Image: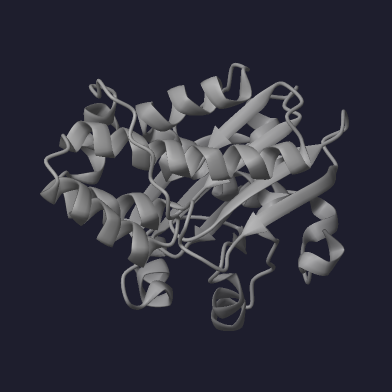
Amino acid sequence: MRFAGIDIGSRTIELVVLKDREIIEMKQADSGFDPLAQAKEMLQGVDHDHIMATGYGRHLFELSFDAPTVTEIKAYAVGARALFPEVRTILDIGGQDSKAIAVNYDGKVIKFEMNDRCAAGTGKFLEIMAKTLGYSLDHFGVEALEATRDIQISSMCTVFAESEVTSLVARGEKRVDIALGLHRSVVKRAAGMMKRVSVIEPILFAGGAARNPCMRRLLEQALGKDILVPENPQMVGALGAALLAGKTDCIPGCNEKDL
């Protein structure tokens, strides 16, 4: 049988299909202005027997497809442990939220914290700041690693930080130095959240921000610990949802209250 997991996020949608617990198909697309329509398009031609949804758009998907759902916290915990069975702490920085998750030796979630009320400390913050400095998001972190001076960014509010960046540019500060300061401000916020939840190793870094080399390096420096980054860090939630779809006690009629 084939089990699918779909993670409908604010910026992107990820789809993973498993057969015999092995990944046989992966897809990713921008969420766009109509995530549900995008999800339907992604599923065209995808062969699966059962599907489970996670992410901020999971409830819309549930209504449209009559599919079970699971919280992002549970999905990420399951997906992370499938990739790295010894993982105890998970950090996910997505498009418009970030979360720190602590799991015990059995993989059960024991504590978590989310930042989902403000763009500060999320991928959206980095995206806006990259655009303000004239960088593509893919090159933002690479350029920040070339900085020669550490500039402190005093505001984490996206609107105020954008204004601060504009002032720094007008003052003649180098773009790469400002870029490093912006990355450091996001890492400081993420590390603070992790320290309130857990910094027990092994630590896994997931989400779109995990593809950023500057974020990875600064996070290791801030925690004083090595971190693990999956080959496809944005697929962790979808993988977890697919694995949960394959649990016989979750089919049919399972919903996130059961998980």
Q: How is the image coloured?
A: one colour
Residue at 86%, 33% (x, y): give it: 104
Q: Is residue 257 above or below residue 187?
A: below
Q: Is residue 152 above or below residue 257?
A: above
Residue at 58%, 22% (x, y): give it: 227
- How many numbered marks are there? 0
> Can residue 231 be seen at all in this image of the molecule?
no
Residue 110, image quadrant: top right
Toward the bottom, the furthest residue is 63
Question: In this image, 101 relative to 224: left or right?
Answer: right
Residue at 66%, 56% (x, y): give it: 114
Question: In this image, 156 relative to 77: left or right?
Answer: left
Question: In this image, 188 relative to 168: left or right?
Answer: right
Q: Is residue 142 above or below residue 156?
A: above
Q: Quadrant of the C terminus?
A: bottom right
Residue at 61%, 76% (x, y): give it: 59
User: Who is closer to the viewer here, 82 or 74?
Assistant: 74
Image position, residue 128 (x, y; %): 28, 57
> Can residue 49 be seen at all in this image of the molecule?
yes
Image position, residue 64 (x, y; %): 54, 82
User: Who is closer to the viewer here, 222 or 136?
Assistant: 222
Image position, residue 78 (x, y; %): 71, 42
Image position, residue 163 (x, y; %): 26, 61
